[in-house]
Amino acid sequence: MELRRVVVTGLGALTPIGNTKDEFWEALISGKSGAAPITYFDTEKFKTKFACELKNFNATDFLERKEARKMDRFTQYAMVASDEAIADSKLDLDAVNKLRVGVIWGAGIGGLETFQDEVLNFAAGDGTPRFNPFFIPKMIADIAPGNISIKHGFMGPNYTTVSACASSANAMIDALNYIRLGHCDVIVTGGSEAAVTIAGMGGFNAMHALSTRNETPETASRPFDATRDGFVLGEGAGAIILEDYEHAKARGAKIYAEVLGGGMSSDAYHMTAPHPEGIGVIAVMRNCLENAGIKPEEVDHINTHGTSTPLGDVAELKAISVVFGAHAKNININSTKSMTGHLLGAAGAIESIASILAMEHGIVPPTINHEVVDENIDPELNLTLNKAQKRDVKVAMSNTFGFGGHNACVLFKKID
C-alpha cells in the first residue's frame, strides 16, 4: 500500500508570548520571555511564585459567554487556537467532506482547574454533594476535540492522546498516520493545557520540578545553562491542520511544510527522570528518522524538549550527539521553552509550530537566558544561544518527552 503524503496547511497559536501565530513568531525571534509573577491566585505561601501565563486574553472575546462558562480554560484555549488554524488553512467548510475530517488533540492533564475548584467547594461545604452539572464535561481531557468537532461538524476520528508532556506530539503522529493510510483527508491536531493553578503549581513544587528563581522570573527558564534549576510552567494551545497532499494541492492551499514522519519510544527507566545516557531519546530520534526516510546528515534544525532541568537537558544533548555523530555540530539546536515555559501537553504542538515557522522564515529562534557554560554539555554543539540565527532550514525535528518515560519526535520538511 502506498502511503499518502501529509502536509501542514494551517497554524494557530495561543501562547504566553503571543496570542496568534504571528505574534508568537515575532516574540520568538525577538527572544521575549513569557515568565512573570502569577496573577491567577495568591502565591504568598508557594515556593514558586511565577509562571508563563497568557497575556491580555479574555475567552469571551472569542466565545459566547454562556459557552465559555461550560468550558475549562484548556478547552477555551483549544477552541481559540483551532479556530485560527482552520481560518489560516482557508478550508471551505461548506465543501469539505466532514466525514473525512477528524480532530486528534493532546492534553497531559485536561481540566485541572475545574477539578480543583469543584473539590475545594465540596470540601468547604457541609458534605452535601452539590457539584456543577458541567463538572465532568468540563474536566475530561477528551472534551477539547469534542467541542472543536461539534462547532464545525467534523465527523472523522475524534479523541485525545494523553502521554504527559508528549501528548500533542503523539496526537500529531496519530493524525499523520490516519491521513497516510487514507482514512482521512484533513485532521485538526495539536494540544492545549491550563495547569497554572493552585494544584498544578503546588504539585510540581512538591516534586522539586519547578524553578524557584522568584527574584528574576524572566530569566528562570534557562535550558542548557549550568545554573538551571527546573522548568517554568506555561499554558496555552497550539493547533495544526494536517492534510492529504493531493487534497491540499487540488484546492490550491498554502503548504507550510510536509510531515515526513514520527517516532515514539519509552525510557522504561523512571517515573519522572530521563535515562542519564538518553537511551530512550536515542531510540525515538532514530525511529523518527527511519519512519521519515531521512538520513541524520539531512537534518538542519532540532527544537529540543529542553525544559531547563539539570538532568533532562544533558541527557537529550548526549542523545543528539550519539544519533547525529559529527553532523550534530552542524545542526541549529534550540529550546523555545526558554521563552514560552513548559506547556506540558501542548508543548509538542507549540514547538512544532516554531519549527515550521523557522523553515518558512529561514530563522532559528534562540535559546535565551544562557549565561554559564555547563561543562557536561559538548561545547561544539550550536545551541542557538541568546540570539536568533539565520538558517535555510530544509528539515526540522521536534522532540517532546513526558513523565512516565514517553518520548515522541516529529520530522518536517520544507516544500520548495
Image (spheres, helix red, strand yellow):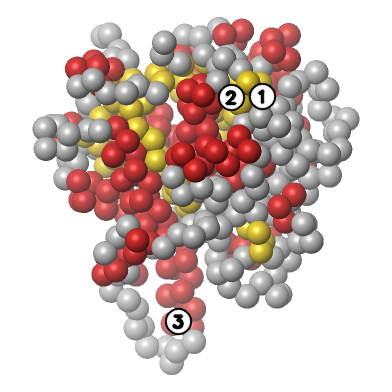
| Amino acid type indicated by mark 3 | Asn
Q: Of callouts 1 and 3, which one flags the residue occurring earlier in the amino acid sequence?
A: 3
Residue positioned most to the bottom: 126
- Residue 141 visible? The answer is no
Give above or below for 229 relative to 40.
above
Residue of label 1? 389
Q: Nearer the viewer, mark 3 or mark 2?
A: 2
Circle 2: is it few (<14), some (14-19), or many (20+) Cα within 10 Å? Answer: some
In front here: 164 or 327? Answer: 327
Disc 3 to disc 2, how far (Cα)?
A: 49 Å
Q: Of callouts 3 and 2, which one flags the residue occurring earlier in the amino acid sequence?
A: 3
Disc 1 to disc 2, how far (Cα)?
A: 6 Å
| Amino acid type indicated by mark 1 | Gln
Residue of label 2? 363
Q: Position of residue 86 (x, y in %)?
A: 29, 39
Residue pictured at 52% horizontal, 15% vertical: 395
Residue pictured at 55% horizontal, 61% vertical: 196
Residue of label 3? 121
Disc 1 to disc 3, how far (Cα)?
A: 50 Å
Q: Position of residue 29 (x, y in %)?
A: 60, 34
Helix, strand or loop for disc 2: strand
Q: Of callouts 1 and 2, which one flags the residue occurring earlier in the amino acid sequence?
A: 2
Residue pictured at 66% horizontal, 64% vertical: 37
Question: Does 4 sit left or right of 283 as displayed?
Answer: left
Quarter occupied by the C terminus: top left
Which of the 4 quarters of the picture holds residue 27? top right
